[in-house]
């Protein structure tokens, strides 16, 4: 292993950079759709993304592109694309959530959209706070209180308040979702946003700000392991700062990432970070 190989989660983070560089902070959902069609091969998309891509090709524009004949419209696909909108809005969760909404409605509805808004705004706040519970509550403040997303994350916060161990929470997630996947009366796919969001924020709450423990907590729960580990690592990374990331976790990547986004096939991670920082400065200078 000499670099980070291509992964759909990372493709979308890099695509966020492309979108902002080309359309600026007034980008629209139609701009997001156009960026997909010009820069991302359809066979490197999955579930909700691939259905939305097919809809776009058939000239079904956002937000209908995420809704029409899309059985995956409340899965995790938008939540995994939240990172860039949090990165470029440190300390501004409202703007992070707004950008995330424009991105998410290309392929999702309701809780699928809320997942991206929640992670983007939480990640934004992670740049200015190391209080995990506070970060989660900031993220919750940008999604509807009557949504299942709000209810499911509140449940995780209540478990922590009650003194339940992480192992007990993990057992609850397994018993509720994974074990019952084959029960026709309670069918739940391992890529659905709700259960995976619970894993992400339980892993953060019980990780004691440990980069390694947070990530391994998330992966140990099963379900969408690469997405959840990445989201937890992203939020903790914002808290840590690049210079404080554990060498054990970053050295194997050799500062290099591979993607399938046109123009970004093999790139230095530090160069992507510099481009992102330039955008942060540009936004701050314009406000």
Image: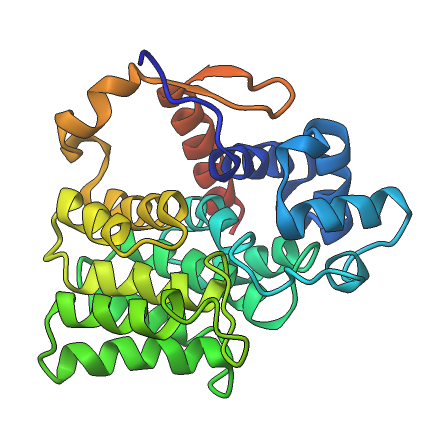
In the depicted view, which residue is nearer to us: 81 or 44?
Answer: 44
Regarding residue 161, the answer to whether it shows in the image is: yes
Residue at position x 10%, y 71% from top?
165
In the depicted view, which residue is nearer to us: 270 or 62?
Answer: 62
Residue at position x 31%, y 14% from top?
1
In the depicted view, which residue is nearer to us: 102 or 220?
Answer: 220
Q: Hey, which quadrant is residue 2 in on the image?
A: top left
The answer to whether residue 275 is left or right of residue 70 is left
The answer to whether residue 196 is left or right of residue 159 is right
In the depicted view, which residue is nearer to us: 213 or 277?
Answer: 213
Residue at position x 38%, y 42% from top?
226
Q: Hey, which quadrant is residue 69 in on the image?
A: bottom right
Q: Position of residue 182 (x, y in %)?
A: 48, 67
Regarding residue 94, the answer to whether it shows in the image is: no
Q: Is the residue 76 above or below the residue 84 in the image?
A: below
Give the colouring mode of the picture.
rainbow
Q: Position of residue 268 (x, y in %)?
A: 40, 16
Q: Residue furthest right?
A: 59
The answer to whether residue 183 is left or right of residue 107 is left
Q: Is the residue 189 above or below the residue 249 in the image?
A: below
Q: Position of residue 208 (x, y in %)?
A: 10, 57
Q: Position of residue 76 (x, y in %)?
A: 51, 56
């Amino acid at each position: 292993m000499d670099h980070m190989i291509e992964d759909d989660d990372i493709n979308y983070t890099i695509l966020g950079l492309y979108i902002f560089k080309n359309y600026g902070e007034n980008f629209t959902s139609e701009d997001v759709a156009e960026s997909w069609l010009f820069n991302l091969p359809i066979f490197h998309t999955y579930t909700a993304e691939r259905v939305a891509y097919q809809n776009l090709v058939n000239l079904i524009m956002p937000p209908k592109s995420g809704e029409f004949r899309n059985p995956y419209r409340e899965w995790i696909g938008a939540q995994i694309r939240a990172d860039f909108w949090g990165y470029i809005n440190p300390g501004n969760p409202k703007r992070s959530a707004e950008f995330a909404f424009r991105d998410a409605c290309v392929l999702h509805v309701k809780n699928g959209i809320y997942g991206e808004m929640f992670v983007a705004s939480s990640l934004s706040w992670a740049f200015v706070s190391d209080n995990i519970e506070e970060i989660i509550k900031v993220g919750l403040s940008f999604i509807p209180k009557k949504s299942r997303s709000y209810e499911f994350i509140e449940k995780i916060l209540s478990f922590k308040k009650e003194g339940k161990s992480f192992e007990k929470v993990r057992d609850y997630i397994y018993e509720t979702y994974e074990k019952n996947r084959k029960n026709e009366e309670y069918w739940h796919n391992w890529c659905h946003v709700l259960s995976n969001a619970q894993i992400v924020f339980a892993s953060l709450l019980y990780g004691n700000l440990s980069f390694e423990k947070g990530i391994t907590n998330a992966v140990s729960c099963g379900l969408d392991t690469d997405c959840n580990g990445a989201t937890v690592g992203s939020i903790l990374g914002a808290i840590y700062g690049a210079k404080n990331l554990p060498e054990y976790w970053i050295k194997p990547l050799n500062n290099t990432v591979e993607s399938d986004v046109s123009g970004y096939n093999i790139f230095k991670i530090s160069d992507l970070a510099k481009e992102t920082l330039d955008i942060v400065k540009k936004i701050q200078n314009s406000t």
